[in-house]
Image (cartoon, grey):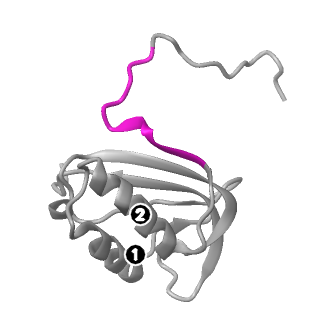
Amino acid sequence: MRMDIVDTPNENAQGSKYLTPQLTFLDKHYNNSTDFFSSIFLLLKEKGYVRDSFLDAILAREKAYPTGLPTLPVAIALPHTDPQHVIRPFISVTRLSQPLAWQEMGMTTIRSTFNLLFYLVLLTTAAT
């Protein structure tokens, strides 16, 4: 392990208009994925990021196409939904205080525990 590498903020780095401190949550606890989606939806709605249809859409999307990735060393989930449910694009990061059971991507019967949740929400679906 290299000891000469120090992890410090880059003071010259440009901030992101999509990733903001108000959408970054550390050591949060949720009982299940529905609890997570419901809680975050209320905040996103209040701050003008999503439409009323967002919660039902994200729950349906996650049920049909799970987003859990059992990556190492930390498993992550990347929930997202269709752009018509979004007012402003954003990225939200949640680090959980306790792992949460989540459906693995492409595996309808496999649930794993996840520690990091990333909402990646954009306003376009066009591929280039």
Residue at left offset 31%, top offset 70%: 55
Q: How many marks?
A: 2
- Whether residue 121 appears in magenta in the rendering, the answer is no
Tell me: 99 left or right of 62: right
Q: Specify whether residue 105 is in view.
A: no
Stretch in magenta: 13-26
Read off the residue under disc 1: 62
Does residue 46 lie above or below 66 as drawn? above
Tell me: 30 left or right of 3: left
Residue 4 percent coordinates (x, y): 79, 15
Does residue 6 lie above or below 66 as drawn? above
Distance between the Cα atoms at labels 2 and 1? Answer: 7 Å
| Of callouts 2 and 1, the N-terminal one | 1
Element at label 1:
helix
Amino acid tagged 1: Glu
- What mark, if any, has residue 79 been given in the picture? 2
Answer few, some or many: residues within 10 Å of disc 2's Cα (few below 14, many 20 plus, some between 14 and 19): some
In front: 105, or 87?
Answer: 87
Residue at left offset 63%, top offset 61%: 29
Tell me: 27 left or right of 122: right
- What mark, if any, has residue 80 been given in the picture? none
Amino acid tagged 2: Pro
